Image (cartoon, helix red, strand yellow):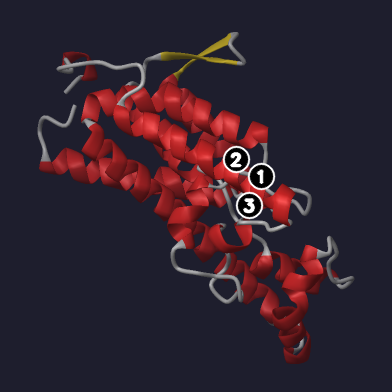
Amino acid sequence: MSYQQYRPNSFSLLPVVVKNLLIINGLFFLTTEVVKGQFNIDLSDNLGLHYFTSENFRPWQLVSYMFMHGSIMHIFFNMFALWMFGNTLENLWGSKRFLIYYMVTGIGAGLIQLLVTHFRLMNLYSQISPESLDHILTQGTEILQEGKNFADPIAGEINGLINSVTIGASGAVFGILLAFGMLFPNTMLYIYFAIPIKAKWFVVLYGAVELISGIANSANDNVAHFAHLGGMLFGFILIKIWQKRNNHFY
């Protein structure tokens, strides 16, 4: 069934869920900056997503990490993409379905990030002694907070994987991007506002770049590429489930 056949009952440039997500993300960012500046407390330690063996891990971080951002540019591009693609999807699906989709893809992205981290750590644990691993688990967080890391590259990578933090709405945003590409595949998008490309190819291109970057695992790359792919994966699965259950999905 073609998406052109759909006619929404109403249309808003800033529907309610998108609007409130923009507000909540903005409030979290401002609060984080104020608390850090005034009290030298980084809220990411409690609200950002940590690996589950880290002393800083809390279950609620699978939700709260989506509302944390590390810089103005980080939150700007995520919120711009949320508005740009999310308003169309919310107008199409309705607020309830859009919110479910956003939360499922965001939480799914976090779970994939933890899963990939787990497999990487399993490969590294065999290359280090139990004593060194215990030292990482007990002292690693403090060392990273000082802006340092272990001199041994294996110990440093393990420490980074266990005690680093994942923040941002990018996983859910990539899920939204995938949904837009699936439902409006031939809509023209413009890379850097100049290069035209159909939405379906834009999604394929972006997904390929994220996969290649994630596999490359560059030491200087602090982007959670597999979280982005996780958002797309959970989005794809959820859309397919909805399509099977509802012949009028579009």
Identity, as a three-letter code, of the amino acid under mark 3 = Ile
Few, some or many residues within 10 Å of mark 3 (<14, 14–19, 20+): few
Residue, x 54% and y 58% (percent of image)? Answer: 47
Question: How far across and how far down the image is residue 58, in percent?
Answer: 50, 69
Which image quadrant for residue 101?
top left
**Quarter containing the N terminus:** top left
Question: What residue is rendered at 22% in x and 20% in y?
Answer: 3
Q: Which structural element holds mark 3?
A: helix
Q: Where is mark 2, residue-wise?
A: 30
Residue type at tag 1: Glu
Direction from residue 38 to residue 173 in the image, left or right: left
Residue 111 visible in rendering: no
Q: Label 2 near label 3: C-beta < 8 Å?
A: no
Residue name at image x 22 percent, y 39 percent: 96
Residue closer to the observer: 92 or 70: 70
Task: Give the residue pinned by disc 1.
Answer: 33
Q: Are marks 1 and 2 in contact (CB under 8 Å)?
A: yes
- Looking at marks 3 and 2 on the same chain, the residue that comes earlier in the sequence is marked by 2
Per the model, the C-alpha gap separating discs 1 and 2 is 5 Å
Q: Residues within 10 Å of mark 2 (few under 14, many from 20)?
A: some
Q: Residue lying furthest front in this view? A: 38
- Res 245 → quadrant: top left
Determine whether the residue tagged by mark 2 lies in a helix, strand or loop. helix
- Residue 168 lies left or right of residue 107; in this view the side is right
Point out the frontmost of discs 1 and 3.
1
Q: Which mark is residue 215?
A: 3
The kind of residue tagged 2 is Leu
Which is more N-terminal, label 3 or label 1? 1
* Residue 98, visible in the rendered structure: yes
